[in-house]
Amino acid sequence: MTGVLGAIADDFTGATDVAVAFRRGGLHTLLFFGVPSGNEVTPPHDAIVIALKSRAIPAEEAVAKSLEALRWLQNRKADQIYFKYCSTFDSTTHGNIGPVLDALSQTLSPARVMTTPSSPEHGRTQYQGHLFVGDTLLAESPMRDHPATPMTDSHLPRLLRAQTTTPVSLLTHDVVRRGEPAVREAFDGKTGYVLVDALTEDDLRLLGKVVVKSPLVAGAAGLAAGVAAARASTTPSSTEPPTPSGPAAVLAGSCSARTLEQVAVMKRLGRPTHRLDPVATPDPEALAAEALAWYDSLTEPGPLVYSSSSPAELHRTHQELGVTRSAGILEKATGLIAVGLVERGVRRLVAAGGETSGAVVTALDVHGGVIGTEAAPGVPWIHPIGDRRPALLLKSGNFGDPDLLATASLS
Ligand SMILES: Nc1ncnc2c1ncn2[C@@H]1O[C@H](COP(=O)(O)OP(=O)(O)OP(=O)(O)O)[C@@H](O)[C@H]1O
Ligand SMILES: O=C(O)[C@@H](O)C(=O)CO
């Protein structure tokens, strides 16, 4: 392929996930946080990922941001666009997956768009149009308690139809099992958005071949890897930066089940932990000042500052402060803490949660970086452009083994 594969990701951790999928597929990949403002000088590349924070914002803002990213990528010779949404289809009836797909389709005019959130590596599979998280239906998984986008239905065509007037159809696994010609024939016979069942990486590689020339494809990291493998003409880059070292700290704002386990492991290991409580201190500056004063008093390395809470605690906070206000206080505080930690010599920052990671990256004014080694599948160290900035590990809420936060922040 001569053009560039461009990806628009609806959150920062999702962007790192898709960048890893492209890199593993053999594509030289650049990652930018937000739409770059100018004509950035870029090293040679096969793919560019733009990380937005558009998952939970109003649909019209998500559309405007995504179209801005699309225009930038088209100016950079992108000949195919991958819209990366979450493998747990995080969205509401107002969007933002449907509205963004509609807007990208209007510009790119694809005959049809293949999409699936299937990402077997992360335990997400699509069967008969239903999304599974491991062996559990999405709506019975902890995602039903998500603070911003609670997922209470598992049937993907129904979820997507609620967000768009474009026709949505299903291509089931019995067709996928029959192989590439059968999938190609069934796919070519459809219009609109085609949700395709996929259970394995092999299924997704097959799907990648079918859509290798489609101007627009959408999904999670699973289908992205399939598309990358189909496009790749080179072997994976050997210039990956080494795993970073130096003083580390963890900032956890995700309330996802896996992050709660990871926080619990850090406590069990006796690592220094500090809880941000927006009800007790509903002021971001004061919350951040308390956390940094606590950090200054520490003698042990690898501390954790967290607001991660159980569904019951979260419910109490939401009753007290509201969803938007509590998240706003915590994200502002987290950004201030990140800046304070870097001023105090932290060289590696681990952030848990997509929105939380977005707050950290924005506060540190990081614009882009080189994808490095993976601390867990889909969770790479990012080496920001600019020598004063720390290496970042941006962890999706539900990603990583229970000990990931503890091991990634060891000296
Ligand atoms: N104690 C709390 N009370 C209220 N809101 C909280 C609390 N802790 C975190 N939050 C908010 O909940 C949201 C968690 O979203 P975030 O994207 O960071 O995690 P996640 O959804 O688990 O991760 P991902 O998007 O990667 O799956 C953030 O907006 C955060 O500020
Ligand atoms: O697809 C996923 O689950 C992740 O990349 C993500 O988007 C979490 O925010």
Image: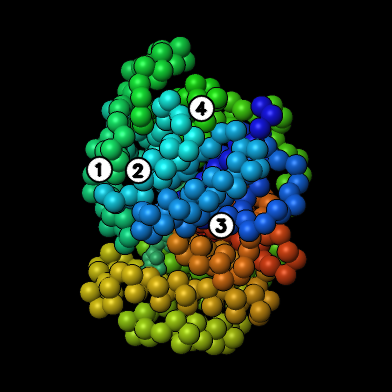
Pick the residue in front: 333 or 313: 333
Mark 4 crowd level (few <14, some 14–19, many ≥20, 10 Å Cα) = many
Residue shown at the point (41%, 57%) measured from the top left: 61
In the image, residue 56 above or below residue 266: above
Amino acid type at image mark 4: Ser
In the image, residue 122 above or below residue 290: above
Q: Whole-Å distance between the Cαs marked 1 and 2?
A: 8 Å
Q: Earlier in the sequence, mark 1 or mark 3?
A: 3
Q: Which residue is mark 2?
A: 98
Amino acid type at image mark 1: Ala
Q: Whole-Å distance between the Cαs marked 4 and 3?
A: 24 Å
Q: Which residue is mark 1?
A: 162
Residue shown at the point (36%, 54%) measured from the top left: 59
Position in image of residue 225 (x %, y %): 54, 34
Q: Whole-Å distance between the Cαs marked 1 and 4?
A: 25 Å
Residue shown at the point (49%, 48%) measured from the top left: 67
Q: Which residue is mark 4?
A: 214
Q: Which residue is mark 3?
A: 34
Q: Is residue 16 visible?
A: no
- Please identify the quarter of the rendering in which residue 198 is found: top left
The CB of the residue at mark 4 lies under 8 Å from ligand 2: no
